[in-house]
Image (tube, helix red, strand yellow):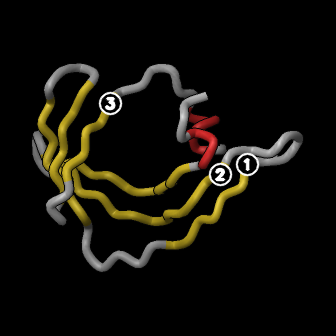
Amino acid sequence: MRPLECSGGIRVRAEVQFAGSQRVMVCFRQGGWVVPSLPNRQKLSWMRKVQQSTPAWLDITVLDEQLRICRGNAGTTFALLKRNDLNLNTFFGV
């Protein structure tokens, strides 16, 4: 288990559309907290609908097949690391 994995995390559901070769538009639909499962219990999550008046965007710089650096419309910077060890159904709880 990773050090912060036991404390939970943030989950976001969003629609993403390409808006050019290096920009994606993001419309957030839901967001909230997810905490680890208790023994013999389902995963706990607190998700709320997001009221977003205009789409957000990310400008993406590709460094290699594993790493992307992104700048968001609010001036935020993200480093996105591709992970092949995650099962999407488990990760998204579906």
Residue 72 place in picture, x, y as percent? 19, 56
Q: Which residue is mark 3?
A: 81
Neighbour class for label 2 at 10 Å: few (<14), some, many (≥20)? some
Q: Work out which quarter of the rendered image holds the N terminus and state it.
A: top right
> Which numbered disc flags the more N-terminal residue, 2 or 1?
2
Quadrant that contains the C terminus: top right
Q: Amino acid at mark 2?
A: Val
The residue beneath circle 1 is 43
Position above or below: 15 against 29: above
In percent of the image, x 26 and y 67: which residue is there?
A: 55
Residue 13 in the image, given as x and y percentages of width and height: 47, 56
Q: 73 above or below 92?
A: below
Drawn side of residue 12 relative to residue 41, left or right? left
- In terms of secondary structure, where does tag 1 sit? loop
Q: Nearer the viewer, residue 59 or 44?
A: 44
Q: How many marks?
A: 3
